[in-house]
Image (cartoon, rainbow, N blue to C red):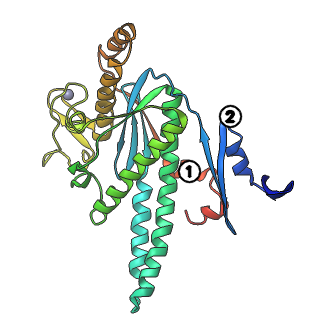
């Protein structure tokens, strides 16, 4: 119950649901204020969070089909291709309504738009939560690249189907970053923001040798290699998302090592040298992952 004092030792009780009580039961949490309207109770809470002591860093790459997180040791890929399908389906539904009254048309579009956004948002929320938990348990700082004005987001050949590429991209790149940032703050996981200069080349240079990577040329089985890049020096195909997070994690790590005491710095340096190994790759289907724990009313829309 939320006990609201009415004066003269009288109180008004507002029952709180299980979810709210669970959230509020977290140690160190303080309710700062509340707002009560006819059908809504809004609680503002605060928590003192101690930043975790990191022993490593891992990069995060966002694109339309997946969220990729990892470093030399392991890479986890959250499959978000279902988001593309949701967006496409909704487009079809909206465009199949042929109404003369544009106001009705607009109403429908906005209703479907809202549903689409909430579904996509939900999938994204599950994936970003997992990323932050992964970072927390592995004691890693999350390395984010500077996405402002990066043309590759809109580039062809990113395996992203045409029409809504630009709009979707710009919306959810920002959204994924926003979610990662606040969730990380809440868990005490540090974030390393790469500068524009540090971001340069993360997708184009080979994480193993630094050579500029090439896209598949004609006659090189372009379909098979459409998410891959060729390193002429290593003589191998690399997955562009995995290569990107490995570059990011290393660049973030450099920043990170500078702030460590000398002894730790030496050990970290040793760990970075030696033969680069191919990381273990874990793939997680975000759409399946999120089906667990979704309210029943919501599942009908999935
Ligand atoms: Zn190479």
Image spot of residue 145 (x, y percent): 31, 39
Q: Is residue 138 left or right of residue 64?
A: right
**Residue, x 29% and y 16% (percent of image)?**
275
Q: Give SS at disc 2.
A: loop
Dot 1: what SS? helix
The quarter of the image that holds ligand 1 is: top left
In the rendered view of the protein, which quadrant contains the C terminus? bottom right
Give how far across and how far down residue 128 sits, in percent. 48, 44
Q: Position of residue 225 (x, y in %)?
A: 24, 44
Q: Position of residue 125 (x, y in %)?
A: 51, 50
Q: Residues within 10 Å of mark 1 (few under 14, many from 20)?
A: some
Q: Which mark is residue 90?
A: none
Instruction: Report the residue marked by disc 1.
Output: 290
Q: Are marks 1 and 2 in contact (CB under 8 Å)?
A: no
Q: Nearer the viewer, mark 1 or mark 2?
A: 2
Near-viewer residue (104 or 34): 34
Towards the viewer: 212 or 11: 11
Does 253 sit left or right of 291 as displayed?
A: left
Where 295 falls versus 282 (above or below)? below
Q: CA gap, disc 1 to disc 2?
A: 26 Å
Mark 2 is surrounded, within 10 Å at the Cα level, by few (under 14), some (14 to 19) or many (20 or more) other residues, namely few
The residue shown at (31%, 32%) is 248
Q: Is residue 92 left or right of residue 228?
A: right
Determine which residue is flagged by label 2: 27
Residue at image x 60%, y 66%? 300
């Amino acid at each position: 119950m939320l006990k609201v004092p009415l004066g003269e030792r009288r109180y008004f009780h507002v029952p709180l649901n299980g979810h709210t009580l669970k959230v509020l039961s977290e140690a160190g949490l303080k309710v700062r204020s509340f707002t009560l309207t006819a059908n809504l109770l809004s609680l503002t809470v605060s928590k003192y969070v101690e930043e975790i002591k990191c022993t490593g860093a891992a990069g995060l790459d966002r694109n339309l089909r997946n969220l990729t997180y990892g470093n030399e040791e392991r890479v986890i890929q959250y499959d978000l291709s279902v988001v593309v399908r949701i967006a496409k389906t909704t487009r079809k539904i909206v465009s199949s309504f042929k109404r003369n009254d544009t106001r009705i048309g607009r109403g429908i579009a906005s209703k479907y738009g809202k549903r689409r956004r909430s579904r996509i948002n939900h999938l994204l929320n599950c994936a970003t939560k997992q990323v932050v938990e992964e970072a927390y348990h592995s004691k890693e700082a999350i390395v984010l690249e500077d996405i402002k004005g990066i043309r590759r987001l809109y580039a062809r050949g990113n395996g992203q189907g045409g029409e809504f590429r630009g709009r979707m991209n710009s919306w959810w790149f920002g959204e994924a970053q926003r979610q990662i940032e606040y969730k990380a703050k809440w868990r005490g996981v540090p974030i390393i923001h790469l500068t524009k200069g540090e971001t340069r080349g993360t997708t184009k240079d080979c994480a193993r040798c630094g050579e500029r990577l090439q896209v598949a040329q004609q006659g090189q089985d372009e379909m098979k290699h459409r998410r891959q890049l060729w390193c002429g020096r290593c003589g191998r195909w690399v997955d562009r998302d995995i290569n990107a997070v490995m570059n990011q994690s290393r660049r973030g790590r450099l920043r990170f090592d500078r702030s460590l005491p000398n002894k730790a710095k030496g050990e970290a340096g040793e760990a970075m040298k030696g033969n680069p190994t191919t990381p273990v790759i874990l793939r997680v289907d975000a759409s399946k992952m999120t089906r667990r724990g979704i309210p029943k009313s919501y599942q009908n829309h999935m």
